[in-house]
Amino acid sequence: MSDNMESHAYDILVIGSGGAGLRAAIAAAEAGATVAVLGKSLLGKAHTVMAEGGVAASLGNLDPADGWETHFYDTMRSGHFINNYKTVEVFAKEAPERVLELEYWGAVFDRTPEGKIMQRPFGAHTFRRLCHVGDRTGKELIRTLEQKIFTVNVDVFQEITATKLFTDNGRVAGAIAYYREDGHFALFSAKAVVIATGGWGKSYKVTSNSWESTGDGAALAFEAGAELIDMEMVQFHPTGMVWPPGVRGVLVTEGVRGEGGLLRNSEGERFMEKYDPQRMELSSRDVVSRSIYKEVQAGRGTPHGGAWLDITHRGPAYIKRKLPGMYEQFMALADVDITKTKFEVGPTIHYTMGGLKVDPLSCATNVPGLFAAGECAAGLHGANRLGGNSLSDILVFGKRAGDGAVEFVKGHEGTPKIDDSEVQAEIDRVLRPFSSENGENPYALHEQLQEIMATHAGISRTGPDLEQGLQKLLELKERARNMAVPGSRVFNPGWHTVQDVHNMITLCEAIIRGAIERKESRGAQWRLDHPDELEEYGKINFVHKLEDGEVKTYTSPVPEMPAELKELFNLGAAPGIAKSGKKE
């Protein structure tokens, strides 16, 4: 056993210190549990800050006809009906309460003239629904939760990486992690664990995601026996920066289009008129991404392979007030003044709709005592996520995961045990790269993984391409068993990359296997060889399990919606419009 390893014991361990993790920790601590939060980065630095445009909730401050039914309708429709209806129902009903709670805790939202929370339009939302703080909403959400966490009894461990979950007779027992600064280990025993580590966008080269997004928690849970679902559904945000090359993929918030930004091709055409004449630039993200891709393929792209986005008609004062982050971002990174000129945008990997399969109410996985919330959990977004739903997702299900973990601990006496030999075996595995001779370079493997995913599992896919990508990935997986790094454990980013590559390869295999099996086009899954959305595939989700070290893929029926919810889709229009007779 490592001679300088720390040892800690808590009721509930939360892995991930973004919005979902902090909200789960707050809920658990307020219920009286002892709680620890592990963060891969510094507190407040989570990827949640990259959610800029707003948090979706049917407050109805600008459009009184809005309600949970319409939000439910929009979310199911955007997810192409492979979402779990119960997850969506809970989400749509509870999102307003969670936003108002955030306001009560001190979040500073933009305001209407009457003093209510301001709401802006967003792609494929029927009504103006996104509560926002300029274009820095995620940052304000994290700031508020960060301040709240200091008022409850939670221990926060920063810059620490978890590498394995332990179980005792099938029940989760805790985790081992190491401090990124000097590499010394810490063992955390726990009666329940909440995974809230976000997505795995760094599996792709052109991405809006920051360095933390390597799928750590989902991979750890999968290896501990949890199931993954809908992994083929990887979202391309239609508007990432295209130029200069050093910032390619950096997010350009949907708020730019929400505030009136127009998309044009190289010939000056407002091309969304062809693809979705009703919703135009505010169509769903899968539709806008495909449309830009088609324009570029047809030779009508911008000089650097994207589309033009123009908001100059709104005027400098309006742009700087409503989109201060975007104005500063383009000035600093591209020397472009978006108040005076159009700018280039293109699709960028942004979000993972798939993830750990969880119960809609408690956020429990199939592993007893193991819960998950936020981007690493699946069920809410189906085949395509609506903009703004990610921030309300982490609030609603972060709380539910924390509550679910508390209820589990109350209902299960005793503390599960962690086997010392398993701990030592994991320490040996994590340290092996330092003693490997002629091992693989983790940075090179990461680049090759990104190339495989971009080439074979990108915005457009075909069966042969996916099969070829899977073979390349399996070869890479074999090579990754023998990664090597020089130096010591102190400040060693190469060593950290070894852990990241291992996790990303695990999840990417599930992505490709799911994409091979789903022989249709639905939401983010665009199969050129199967261009139609097929009824039979709308009735199943693809579920992945790890069996004897191999990723196995199965089908699971999409839960059937009860009659009263089905009726919402028989109205012929979004229920809010049907009730009011017009879109207010």
Image (cartoon, rainbow, N blue to C red):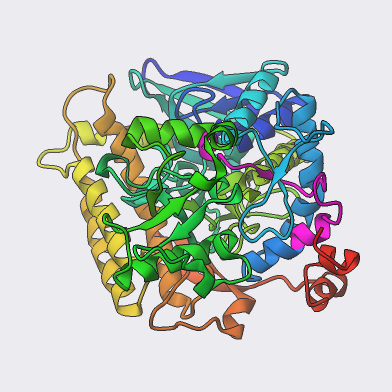
Q: Position of residue 476 (x, y in %)?
A: 24, 56
- The x, y position of residue 504, in whole percent, is 37, 49
Residue at position x 64%, y 59% from top?
A: 379
Q: Is residue 111 left or right of residue 383?
A: right
Residue 243 at x, y = what percent? 30, 46
The quadrant in which the C terminus is found is bottom right
Q: Depth check: 241 or 33 in front?
A: 241
Q: Is residue 565 left or right of residue 341?
A: right
**Residue 298 drawn above or below residue 100:** below
* Image location (x, y in percent) of residue 436: 16, 37
Of 551 and 508, the residue lying toward us: 508
Q: Residue 298: name its quadrant.
A: bottom left
Question: Any magenta on residue 328?
Answer: no
Q: Nearer the viewer, residue 245 or 22?
A: 245
Residue 53 shown in magenta: yes
Is there any visible trace of residue 416 in the rendered image? no
Image quadrant for the N terminus? top left
**What segment is highlighted magenta in the picture?**
47-72
Residue at image location 72% in from the left, 60% down from the top:
126
- Is residue 454 placed above or below 371 in the rendered structure? below
Side (left or right) of 476 relative to 275: left
Nearer the observer, 65 or 391: 65
